[in-house]
Image (cartoon, rainbow, N blue to C red):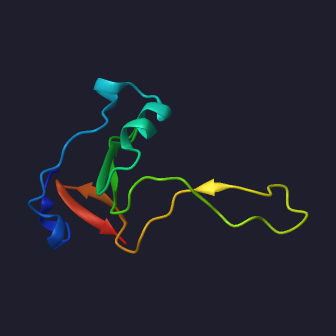
Amino acid sequence: LPDAGALPRYLKGMAWKTIFSTERDGSSFRTFMKNIAGRSPTIIVGQSASREILGGFVDSPWVKKPLPTSPVGHFEAYRTGFHGSGKAFLFEVVDRKIREHA
């Protein structure tokens, strides 16, 4: 990470390991999910078409959990999704410094 100074104290000094890279693993979302499933904590970093560097931190394992059923008559009766804790956050890198967006 460019400047870990903006990260929460408990994340500084952690030994991070690359578990998915589009250069190494391709651009398949299925491969991304296979590599990241059950892992925590994770930091995801990406670059937009306009070269902005964005990312997110998740402290919970990547596990699909069922959501409550939709109201009667609603199109979807059952859905699944991912849920995290209040420690999760998004960030952007500006001038090589991390700016958190809680």
Q: Residue at x 74, y 56 (%)?
A: 78
Q: Which residue is drawn at 12% across and 51% down?
A: 15
Q: In the rendered view of the protein, which quadrant contains the C terminus?
A: bottom left
Pinpoint residue 37: horizontal percent, then vertical percent: 41, 45
Pinpoint residue 42: horizontal percent, then vertical percent: 30, 53
Q: Which residue is drawn at 29% across and 67% down?
A: 100
Pinpoint residue 50: horizontal percent, then vertical percent: 38, 41
- Write down the quadrant of residue 58 in the picture: bottom left
Q: Which residue is drawn at 17% across and 49% down?
A: 16
Pinpoint residue 36: horizontal percent, then vertical percent: 37, 43
- Write down the quadrant of residue 21 in the picture: top left
Q: Which residue lies furthest to the right in this view?
A: 73
- Decide which of 45, 64 is in the foreground and name it: 64
Q: Residue furthest left?
A: 13
- Decide which of 12, 90 is in the foreground and name it: 12
- Write down the quadrant of residue 14 in the picture: bottom left
Left or right of 5, for residue 56:
right
- Decide which of 51, 102 is in the foreground and name it: 102
